[in-house]
Amino acid sequence: MDHPDRFDPASVGAFRVLDHRFDPVTRELTLRYAFDRGPAFEESVIFETQPHSDWRGPAAGFERALLHLQIAAGTSYYKAAAPPLVEVVGADLPGCEAEFHRRLYDDGLREFAVANGLPVPLPVAVRPSRAVPEGADLAGPLPTGTKVPAHDPTARPGGLAVPIGGGKDSMVLIEALRPFTPTLFAVNPHPLVEELAAGTGLDLVVVRRRLDPSLAVLNRSGAMNGHVPITAIVSLIAVVGSFLYGYDAIAMAVERSASEETRFVGGATVNHQFSKSAEFEGLLRHLVTSAIDPGLTYASALRPYSELAIARAFAGLTGYHPTFCSCNRAFRQDAAPDQRWCGDCPKCRFVGLMLAPFLTPAAVSGIIGRDLFADPGQVAGFAALMSDEDKPFECVGERRESAAAIRMLSELPEWSATAVVRALAPRARALVSASEVASLLVAEDGSAFPDPSVAAAVDRALSPVP
């Protein structure tokens, strides 16, 4: 007999994106969702930082940005049951916009699907519904509509926003774009991120996203859980932010290797970093320009570059070495405030591997907190970074980048005799040639940031010093 308090994902037929409200005084956005048989959820997104000006974008574009953010953020709740239908209640959703979100709910949740034994591709449809279904008011009445004053488009302050996550990529981009005085942008910033941002001397826009606490209760009661396309959610929060803070370009710090699949499952690609991929970037850029704000640029300024090229640039930014962090364990809610690198996860290995060709063993150990390369117990973890079968579901680069870094280390006397390099050098040499290593350190054509002045500044910062 089933426990009466257990949640049965199979009992859910549809996930409903309900109404939303934005309070222009508190800058709090409330988002509501529900499963067709309950429960309902209510999330808040608070734009904590006070805008410097009274400029506001066009009301129609702002409302559209709110809607698309709401649908994307809904992935956090949808995954509790992953029903075959996502119903957007009371809103128009043209086919191309619905298809954007279908891709997000499928490709963006494929890792989640694998972890929960669901089909890949994930069979899900996203469609609008003008009818307000029974149960849509489960969370109580919530007025809809958004009050945004009309404005003179010429009064837009303009400028660049750079989302910051605490890793090496965003710090390289921030320094490359320093001549433009970019605004930094962070959602739920960890104290480590706030420390890094303060060290830049640049303005930081802070946004707080608060998930409905009932979701955690549901997860303990039988709901499914797993990875969501968080970069898509953060990106759309930044798009909404452009209407409040007036910037006209969002420069992401995402490298080209994010486009590589993590695994193939039944012939279908599964990419942990789908919402960082070049394909998704193109989908979101089209959505922004065609449905939200044609005057807003969204793109990654690091897209032409490999992780190796970015690490080479970061190696010279020694002022950030003691404070940056890419280890996901440091960002967990239960992590100690002073926790940085765990020294035993795919991110620690990968970041250490990317930096090692450009730093001494002592410098890399000083960053990570231990000498990973001297430990034979780390060999399997480093080997997985080059593996077709075992590449970890983490934000790590291409397999050939990891092989290239091992090959480079095998030719450096201070690294070649370490346990990890000695064990993996033959495999690395078999995977990448010397010419392929060289090509990884060169910018890829055709994917530069749309603003030529921004692209040129990044190219200068990432070009090797003669």
Image: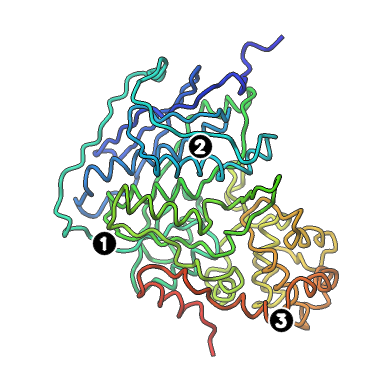
Judging by the rendered image, the residue that carries numbered circle 1 is 158
Above or below, comparing residue 58 to residue 223 in the picture: below
The amino acid on which the numbered mark 2 sits, given as a three-letter code, is: Thr
Q: Position of residue 55 (x, y in %)?
A: 20, 52
Judging by the rendered image, the residue that carries numbered circle 3 is 434
Which mark is first along the chain, 3 or 2?
2
Q: Secondary structure at mark 1?
A: loop
Judging by the rendered image, the residue that carries numbered circle 2 is 75
Q: Can residue 353 be seen in the rendering of this structure?
A: no
Above or below, comparing residue 318 to residue 345 in the picture: below
Picture quadrant of residue 449: bottom left
**Observer-nearest residue: 168 or 259?**
259
Which mark is first along the chain, 3 or 1?
1
The amino acid on which the numbered mark 1 sits, given as a three-letter code, is: Gly
- Viewed as shown, does residue 434 lie left or right of 190? right
Q: Nearer the viewer, mark 1 or mark 3?
A: 3
**Observer-nearest residue: 217 or 200?**
217
